[in-house]
Amino acid sequence: MTSRLLTAAAVAFIALVGTHRDAMAQELNSTAALQHAVLGGKDIHVVLDLSRCTDQGTGKAGPAIRGSVQPDAFMVQGDHSIAFSTTHFTVRPDKTAVLEFNAFRVQPGGRVDLNSVFLTPVNDTVLHEAQFACAIGNGVRFEESH
């Protein structure tokens, strides 16, 4: 009986924490809301679904890649666009080490441009480059953590 109570308590706690976390995240659904959060020094998560974006090289939907990042710095430019970037080291399926650099620019109208560059870590030679056009709420979502 005690193990059932502990299990029930654990499930209830996990559900409560999950609900509390979801209630704490606020979606930023416009460039103005994102700018307000950026200039207020808020922690912002970026949720991506590249399949809902357009590959600017082909005009087709982007690859079936989804994920999230939490950039550590954002800049509001003079034209009111918002720029940020992420960089990380990764290993491709063929065991090749690469440095991935993603530069984002959020335009005042809500368009989000992503330039992704893969470099060799030895000499920074460009291995692959891709550009995607997304939109706030369609391929890119911003969430402010409280």
Image: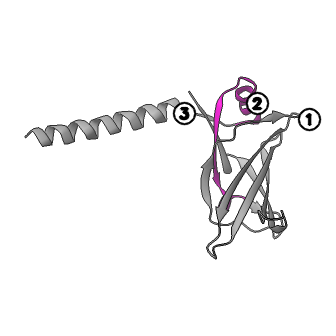
Q: Which residue is mark 1?
A: 79
Residue 40 x, y percent position in the rendering: 71, 23
* Left or right: where 13 falls relative to 54: left
Which region shows up in magenta?
A: 30-53
- Which residue is situated farthest in the top direction here? 40
Alpha-carbon distance for marks 1 and 2?
12 Å
Three-letter code for the amino acid on which mark 2 is drawn: Gln
Residue 56 x, y percent position in the rendering: 82, 63
Quick one: label 3, few (<14), some, or many (20+) residues within 10 Å?
some
Q: Is residue 117 magenta?
A: no
Three-letter code for the amino acid on which mark 3 is drawn: Ala
Residue at (20, 42) in percent of width and height: 7
Residue at (77, 36) in percent of width and height: 74
Label located before the other in sequence (1 or 2): 2
- Which residue is situated farthest in the bottom direction here? 94
Residues at circles 3 and 1 in contact by the CB criterion of under 8 Å: no
Quick one: label 2, few (<14), some, or many (20+) residues within 10 Å?
many
* Left or right: where 87 falls relative to 19: right
Label located before the other in sequence (3 or 1): 3
- Which residue is situated farthest in the right direction here? 78
Q: Which residue is mark 2?
A: 35
State the image quarter where residue 94 is shown.
bottom right
Three-letter code for the amino acid on which mark 1 is drawn: Asp
Quick one: label 1, few (<14), some, or many (20+) residues within 10 Å?
few
